[in-house]
Image (cartoon, rainbow, N blue to C red):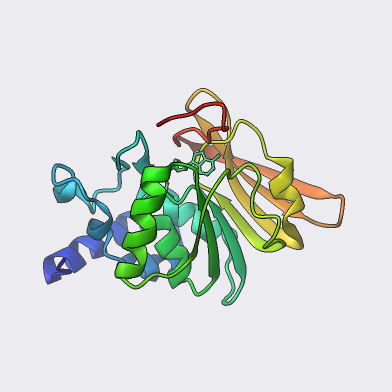
Amino acid sequence: MIDSYKHKGLRNKLVEKIRERGISDEKVLSVIQEIPRHYFIHDNTFLPYAYDDVAFPIGAQQTISQPYTVAFQTALLNLQKGQKVLEIGTGSGYQTAVLVKMGVKVFTIERQKTLFDKTKQFLPSIGYRPKFFYGDGYKGLPNYAPFDKIIVTAGAPFVPEDLKSQLLIGGTMVIPVGEGGVQKMNVVKRISELDFEQKVLEEFKFVPMLTNKEYNG
Ligand code: SAH
């Protein structure tokens, strides 16, 4: 795959668009500027639109998140180099790559086997090496907890207790919460062993975070 001047130019424009929509975190913007999003789109039909600020199907009824959404969630995490980050919903691996490039240690979980296998092979092939897990995001990764930050990239019906318990005190989870295809971005901060602070922000549309009962191929 080639990352041409044309692609870089398109990314410049994309970054400007995201900036205009209100993202001001320069580190996040520069990471979006650097990662070739067209590498993550394996369907030629959508390739010409790789740098439009939209979501795309990536197979198995899933989508690669919209760049604005990726930037919004990443900025909310307020990442510091070396932190441990749990990501639920590996999908295409684009958000994962953004996290890796932010300089954090990424643990990413995907429940869809086809996508898991594909992205586990693909991401290292373009230089990104998070730790991949095939499993249920509702359960998190108790053996690797606690995490400084947790990011959920599927729409959750509620904030899973298991994930809250895997946050470090002082840690933050960014999670879209809501049913019926629309969610509100929630920021959950653990302020002590038992106390959490929750902020509810604007609306987004994610594919649903599924439980094991809702098998989706
Ligand atoms: N960050 C991804 C977004 C993918 S869409 C990207 O930018 O490409 C959300 C992903 O969450 C899908 O791949 C879906 O299979 C996965 N997912 C849904 N429910 C899950 C669960 N309970 N555990 C882990 N992954 C889940």
Q: Position of residue 12 (x, y in %)?
A: 25, 65
What residue is rendered at 13% in x and 71% in y?
5
Residue 12 visible in the snapshot:
yes
What residue is rendered at 24% in x and 62% in y?
11
Q: Position of residue 182 (x, y in %)?
A: 49, 29
Looking at the image, which is closer to me, 172 or 90? 90
Left or right of 100? Residue 158 is right
Q: Position of residue 207 (x, y in %)?
A: 44, 34
Q: Position of residue 185 (x, y in %)?
A: 57, 42
Query: Quick check: 25 above or below 195?
Result: below
User: Which quarter shows the N terminus?
Assistant: bottom left
What residue is rendered at 54% in x and 55% in y?
87
What residue is rendered at 43% in x and 48% in y?
69
Residue 65 visible in the snapshot:
no
Looking at the image, which is closer to me, 179 or 197? 179
Please tell me how many numbered marks the rendered image carries: 0
